[in-house]
Amino acid sequence: MRIVVSGRLPDVVRERLEAQHEVILNLHDAPMARADLLDQVANSDGLLCMITDRVDAELLDRAPNLKMVANCGVGYDNIDVADCSRRGILVSNTPGVLTEATAELTWALILAISRNVVSGDAYTRAGRFRFWAPLHFLGTEVSGKTLGIIGMGRIGRAVARRAAGFQMPVCYYSRSPLPEDAAAGFEGEAVSFDALLERADFVTLHLPLTRETQHLIDAAALARMKSNAFLINTARGPVVDETALVGALRSGQIAGAALDVYENEPALAPGLAELDNVVLLPHMGSATWETRTRMTALAAENLLAGLAGRQPPNCLNWPSSRSADT
Ligand code: DGY
């Protein structure tokens, strides 16, 4: 069969796909251009796509032979899963393998924004470090502060587990009840959305982008946060109304924000990059060698299974009419 892979893969993963199928590769670090992707899917059976590719009606109309879309990412808001299902196309994602890496980066952001890590680095590199002074570069201590986690899936819980190291009480907001064994490894209090915003010194987001979560953090939510609180986002940009966030950061309504994701990624909301109470990263929550190798390998495993007629391990729309072992 013919497979399109829209992003660069580690050699070991590429070789695994090439051993079984004809593989069209993107050999560049940049995403495959939309026009190229549309051309390449036209006569392909499988697509291993990145979270930057939109798999929508336009693409699906161009791909009459497509049987399986394997997303290299846990978030799949880039894919119209319902439309794929209507057309009989399987879709998968890569949950589980990026949990720890994303939790680590969340903590890097918490520490970076509260302790002026990025501005301190820039200051030192610029040759401006000439003396130690008692009131210089004062940040906010993290230890003992309240961590508020919105979205208590795998990543939210991995962030919570690490809070014990900083003696931080954890409160969390989750719309669905936690699985029975999920509370193991961390202590936390389930609270309402409003109570979390009012109580937390660090509000960190770990929920998927859906119609319900879009702009969950809007002007009203930001107004509920404490004026000395920080917002951390390693989930999806559109969960936050970025224009409202710029306003809240400018006016001092909240103390700062550390973001890995953006509402109109890769564009930033006007004014965001000019603020000095933000840390801004280029969507790198899962960017470790270990994790990206696992993510691409899992996406490939899903794709190979689907194309072989087997249920992919992380299938999002396996038809109930098909048994697991067909
Ligand atoms: C994902 O998997 O959804 C992440 O955003 C990629 O880093």
Image (spheres, helix red, strand yellow):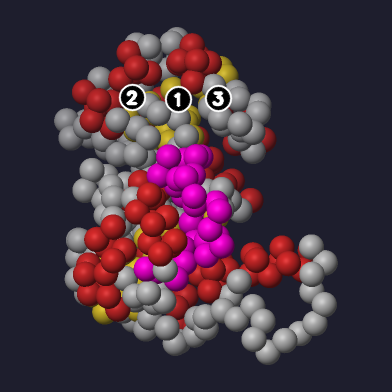
Sequence-earlier tag: 1 or 2: 1
Q: Residue shown at 44%/87% (left/top)?
A: 144
**Left or right of 128, for residue 7:** left
Residue closer to the observer: 5 or 102: 102
The numbered disc on residue 32 is 3
Query: Which residue is under mark 1?
Result: 47
Amino acid type shown at disc 3: Met
Q: Amino acid at mark 1?
A: Leu
The image's mark for residue 56 is 2
Q: Quadrant of residue 188?
A: bottom left
Q: Residue at x 80, y 82 (%)?
A: 131
**Residue range corresponding to the magenta coloring:** 253-279
Q: Amino acid at mark 2?
A: Asp
The answer to whether residue 272 is magenta is yes
Numbered disc total: 3
Q: Is mark 3 within 8 Å of ligand 1?
A: no
The answer to whether residue 106 is above or below residue 301 is: below
Residue 255, percent from left and from top: 44, 71
Toward the bottom, the furthest residue is 134
The quadrant of the picture occupied by the C terminus is: top left
Magenta-colored stretch includes residue 143: no
Q: Is residue 76 left or right of residue 12?
A: left
Q: State the SS at label 2.
A: loop
